[in-house]
Image (cartoon, rainbow, N blue to C red):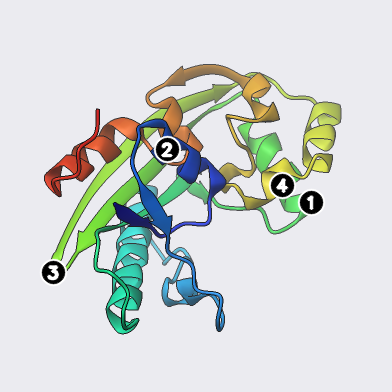
Amino acid sequence: MIYLASRSPRRRELLAQIGVKFEPLLFRDGPRQDADTDEAVRPGEDADAYVRRVTRLKAEAAWQRIVMRRGLRRMPVLAADTTVALAGEILGKPAGRADAERILRLLSGTQHRVLTAVAIGFEDRLEMAVSESLVTFGPVDEARIAAYVQSGEPYDKAGAYGIQGRAGAFVERLEGSYTGVMGLPLYETAGLLRLFGIPVP
């Protein structure tokens, strides 16, 4: 059993897919303590350094919440973060409709990088792995972009799209990990879980 420090339904589905038992690490009282994690891109920070830093901070903040909450069973905690990068620019979650449309225009007809870092922390130990995939979009015209944004799907996703949803139709080629692009690379995740003695296929 582990804690999952993520509200992502996709990460929950992927952990369940490989038979990992988990409890969501969610606290109803008070503001979301993910505020402990500074997700703003720092000057000069590239996508690789960014995704590692944010994931480490998420895992460390989650472990501290476990330690501070009396009566909470101590188990390993898993955190992850996904970022999309194109020509050196980090494309995060869109701020609104216009931003989502801007990001999708940038991705149309190009190849971009998707980096997902996964970290597991327990006591003083933290292990991390990073999955990198290359995704190529075919040309996506304005009407298709507008329809996709109207669906509401892009808003909580790095790069303004989810490969497992309607935007799967935009993907001409994928080199790397499909589950990594979804937000939790199962190969790397399974390897980390084994390091902590958690049985996985």
**Residue 16: which numbered mark, if any?**
2
- Residue at image position (43%, 31%) is 179
Which residue position holds label 1?
97
**Residue 100: which numbered mark, if any?**
4
Amino acid found under the numbered disc labelled 1 = Arg
Q: CA distance from mark 2 to mark 4?
A: 30 Å
Cβ–Cβ under 8 Å for marks 1 and 4: yes
Does residue 86 appear in this view? no
Q: CA distance from mark 2 to mark 3?
A: 27 Å
Amino acid found under the numbered disc labelled 2 = Ala
- Quadrant in the rendering for residue 88: top left
Q: Give neighbour class at mark 2: few <14, some 14-19, many 20+ (Cα, 10 Å).
A: few
Q: CA distance from mark 1 to mark 4?
A: 5 Å
**Mark 3 secondary-structure assignment:** loop
Cβ–Cβ under 8 Å for marks 3 and 4: no
Labels 1 and 3: the sequence-earlier one: 1
Question: Which is closer to the viewer, label 2 or label 1?
Answer: 2
Position above or below: 20 against 47: above
Q: Give neighbour class at mark 4: few <14, some 14-19, many 20+ (Cα, 10 Å).
A: many
Which residue position holds label 3?
124
Amino acid found under the numbered disc labelled 3 = Asp
- The residue closer to the viewer here, 110 or 128, is 128
Labels 2 and 4: the sequence-earlier one: 2
Labels 2 and 1: the sequence-earlier one: 2
**Mark 4 secondary-structure assignment:** helix
